[in-house]
């Protein structure tokens, strides 16, 4: 178990922030790295050609380490929608093919598939939320020989519902379907191994569980797609882009691996040092330890919520870091008011309150939330 890390953040004593799934609070170390990065361009004569590559490559390496992949398999992207668009552009679809998504899935992993379906005659099929909350079972029941793509999260963004991707990937391989994962609500808090799951594409934003800045994320691309088509064609993704004097010796070849899919101007001098500092901190804490520490918090909340008559998924069907408390009659308006009055921050999603703590939360934060919940 990791002891409370609140000292590494700038969170006032009276704030109870249980909403990491919305935006993680920035680590002080990440802010510092960003300040240094912003200031760097005050003196551009100090920025040399190598600076366009060094931190980007370090970041690629750390993210690859976190998901048990190779640095060559990682592209730098600005948003999940960008990564999903790359996947949709590179997976071949034909009329009648099925693309499977989940009910209420995050829209950045929906719209590109709708567009791809419109262009090819494929069909987007939505797996309904199962009564007993077992998404894995429900999804397995829908993957058949017509399935061309399974585009799903690892953990449902509304309530932390888990999808067992090892089982899903196994079925996808058997049926010849591609697996595309939006891991934004899990990587950093839930261990993930690309070597074990073997997805075709995996996408994540960094501004939630990776403690990175907004507008910088990652795309894992399986080697079989690494000679695919990028969304855009910038100079840095091409072979020999390190040679600034020779950039107009236009190249047909790309940089190795998944680098061809990097977004233009990916060597962002302010954001890249921030995400690098954030990844270093997470690897230092260790993802398995983070998950174990957060599950102690969410399990305590789940127990008390069940006593109060709220519906919570069993621990084995939800992430250790993210949970939904379901109010059968809807979330009481006065509860939302009381939470705000007590400076307790959570998200309301339909009939649920979404709770997502992190290492800056204290036992007192959890008590305060539970007291407010019970005081209706
Ligand atoms: C599951 C999931 N995917 C993606 C995003 C963000 O998408 P984008 O980077 O396209 O803005 C969010 C934000 O809440 C999310 O919860």
Image: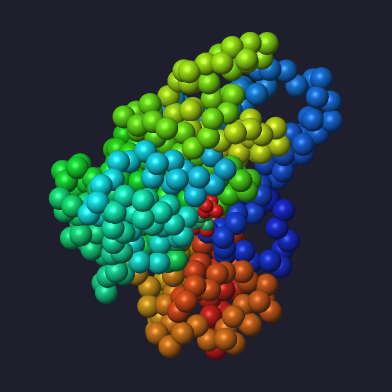
Q: Furthest residue to the right?
A: 42
- Give residue 265's position: percent from left, percent from top: 63, 32
Nearest the camera: 314 or 41? 41
Quarter-wise, where is residue 273 in the image? top right
- Give residue 287's position: percent from left, percent from top: 46, 44
Position of residue 313 in the picture relative to residue 63 (left or right): left
Task: Look at 49% across and 72% down and name the residue there.
Answer: 349
- Give residue 79's position: percent from left, percent from top: 54, 47
Task: Look at 53% across and 73% down and name the residue there.
Answer: 348
Quarter-wise, where is residue 335 in the image? bottom right
Task: Look at 29% across and 69% down and name the residue there.
Answer: 128
- Give residue 122's position: percent from left, percent from top: 28, 54
In this view, 244 is above or below 194: above
In this view, 248 is above or below 152: above
- Image quarter where the C terminus lies is bottom right
Residue 38 visible in image = yes
Position of residue 267 in the picture relative to residue 36 (left or right): left
Residue 168 visible in image = no
Coloring scheme used: rainbow
Task: Look at 68% across and 17% down and name the residue there.
Answer: 49
- How many labels, in total? 0
In this view, 144 is above or below 254: below
Position of residue 137 in the picture relative to residue 264 (left or right): left
In this view, 79 is above or below 15: above
């Amino acid at each position: 178990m990791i002891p409370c890390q609140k000292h590494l953040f700038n969170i006032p004593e009276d704030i109870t922030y249980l909403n990491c799934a919305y935006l993680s609070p920035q680590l002080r170390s990440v802010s510092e790295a960003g300040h240094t990065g912003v200031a760097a361009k005050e003196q551009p004569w100090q920025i040399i050609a190598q600076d366009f590559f060094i931190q980007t490559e370090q970041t690629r390496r750390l993210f690859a380490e976190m998901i048990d992949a190779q640095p060559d398999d990682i592209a730098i992207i600005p948003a999940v929608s960008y990564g999903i668009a790359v996947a949709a552009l590179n997976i071949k679809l034909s009329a009648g093919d099925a693309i499977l998504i989940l009910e209420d899935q995050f829209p950045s992993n929906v719209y590109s598939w709708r567009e791809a379906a419109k262009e090819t005659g494929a069909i987007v099929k939505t797996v309904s939320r199962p009564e007993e909350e077992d998404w894995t079972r429900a999804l397995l029941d829908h993957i058949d020989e017509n399935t061309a793509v399974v585009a799903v999260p690892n953990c449902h963004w509304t309530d932390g519902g888990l999808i067992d991707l090892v089982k899903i990937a196994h079925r996808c391989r058997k049926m010849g379907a591609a697996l595309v994962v939006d891991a934004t609500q899990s990587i950093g808090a839930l261990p993930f191994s690309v070597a074990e799951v073997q997805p075709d594409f995996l996408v994540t934003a960094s501004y939630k569980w990776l403690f990175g800045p907004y507008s910088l994320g990652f795309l894992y691309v399986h080697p079989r797609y690494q000679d695919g088509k990028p969304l855009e064609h910038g100079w840095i993704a091409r072979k020999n882009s390190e040679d600034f004097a020779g950039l107009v010796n236009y190249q047909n070849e790309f940089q190795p691996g998944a680098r061809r899919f990097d977004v233009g101007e990916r060597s962002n001098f302010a954001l890249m040092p921030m995400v690098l500092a954030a990844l270093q901190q997470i690897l230092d804490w260790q993802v398995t330890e983070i998950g174990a520490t957060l599950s102690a918090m969410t399990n305590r909340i789940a127990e008390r919520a069940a006593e109060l008559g709220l519906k919570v998924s069993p621990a084995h069907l939800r992430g250790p870091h993210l949970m939904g408390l379901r109010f059968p009659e809807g979330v009481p308006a006065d509860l939302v008011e009381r939470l705000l009055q007590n400076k307790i921050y959570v998200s309301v999603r339909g009939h649920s309150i979404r709770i997502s703590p992190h290492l800056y939360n204290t036992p007192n934060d959890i008590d305060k939330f539970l007291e407010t919940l019970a005081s209706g």
